Image: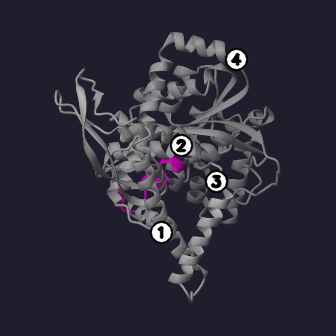
Amino acid sequence: MEFSTKVIEKMAEIMAEEMGNQISNPQDIREVETGMRELLRKVGAEGLQRYLEQMDGVVQPQEKEMDCECTGKRRYLFRRKAVILSVFGRVSYKRRYYVCPECGSGMCPLDQRMQLAAGEVTAGLAELLALAGVETAFAESSRLVERFLLFRVSDNTLRKETERFGELQKAREEEWKRQSQDEAWLQARLQQHGRQAGRLYGSIDGVMAPCKGEWREMKNIAWYQVEPTRSYEKRRHHASLVGEQNDLQAREITYHCDIQSPDQFGDLFWATACQRNADLYEELVFVCDGAVWIWKLIERHFPQAVQIVDWYHASEYLPSIAEAAFGHETPEYLAWLEQARSLLWEGQIDDLIHDCQSLGSIPAAQKAVHNAVSYFSNNQKRMDYARFRQQGYFIGSGTVESVGKQIAALRLKRAGARWTENGAVATAKARAAWLSNQWDHLAARRSILPLAT
């Protein structure tokens, strides 16, 4: 928006004069800033009230009657008062009110035009509340909002708006599911986009979330592309240069999640894949951990995709063997672990399995050896890391780890968190949309929600 310089200067002059009257001997600049912010908030609330009341006569000429959906006529009664909660706090305004004697329904043209609902949060404030809600616990978010906006919003209101954004994201995903099963839509998409050059990556993960006293697995999917980093600096990985791909980074990441069975989650997996045109790419690559349900899902929908077990998850099986066999951080522990990681890094899985099995005679190490050998044997073709790196594939752990961590672990697992399943899913979906830079889609839908309901 472009505002008149003269108007800004005049308002600034008035504000400076008022602040001088209110704070003649300030303790510090913070006192002045806080006072000016409070003044701006009150001016905003008063300005919004006056703007809405002015608009009431603009959105539609004054009429005694208006058509009703029941084919009757709504009749003008009076200018009715309403209160809304806006980014400036509570705002009270009056607008024309019509009622249909046939069906009894009432309507305010201004509210309909501006997407307002009496007693409700405005779309602008709803977006800010939901943003706070996807970042931290609702009680903490409420305190943060009060600091930022200088008025209190209840924990429950904040939770409600956060979950509402999640429900809007769920509705988007349901529409994607319908589209992904529509052959005509799929054909039109192919004609529009054609085959896509390059590589697209996907990572699937599961993380446990607390729901009503029990833990449920939230399944997550991330779609992304990979590009070389502009500045590459070698860093050591657990005291070793083995295991680093600092020259590659993920970009354009989109996240999606739900608490569902693998079969149900498969519908969301396929739908989001279509949204990212995954099936149209020249090459599709999945970097995931070794969970059986994940690879079954991938093989069902994309049997030709390149499958790579995430390097970090594979390497995690080795320290427990070394510690059980040699003790923690002993010279033998460090030497064996360095050699084992090197074999894994080079994709020499047969040799790695042999080295693990050689420690199987040590009773304390038997369980760790069995777990590692089973994991490496079942995923051997997905652990050809030397070839993958030579062909430029991303095998690092960052993106697959962040799927669950960014969506669920950092928000749902906060101390003291107690979720209903619907609340957990809605909050996680809203957070996923924010992390995926898809927030504007939800904010636009939220702005018309009162009219839709």
**Residue kind at label 1, given as amino acid type:** Arg
Looking at the rendered image, the disc whose residue lies closer to the viewer, 2 or 3, is 3
Asked if the residues shown at circle 4 and circle 3 are in contact, with their CB atoms under 8 angstroms apart, the answer is no
Q: CA distance from mark 4 to mark 3?
A: 46 Å
Estimate the x, y position of residue 310 in percent, counting from the top left.
63, 41
Q: CA distance from mark 1 to mark 3?
A: 27 Å
**Residue kind at label 2, given as amino acid type:** Trp
Marks 4 and 2, the one that precedes in the sequence: 4
Q: Classify mark 4: helix, strand or loop.
A: loop
Residue, disc 4: 195
Marks 1 and 2, the one that precedes in the sequence: 1
Circle 2 crowding by C-alpha within 10 Å: few under 14, some 14–19, many from 20? some
Q: CA distance from mark 2 to mark 3?
A: 27 Å
Q: Main secondary structure of the magenta part?
A: helix
- The quarter holding residue 377 reads top right
Estimate the x, y position of residue 395 in percent, counting from the top left.
69, 40
Task: Judge by depth and name the residue closer to the eye, 368 or 116.
Answer: 116
Quadrant showing the C terminus: top left
Estimate the x, y position of residue 212 in percent, counting from the top left.
29, 50
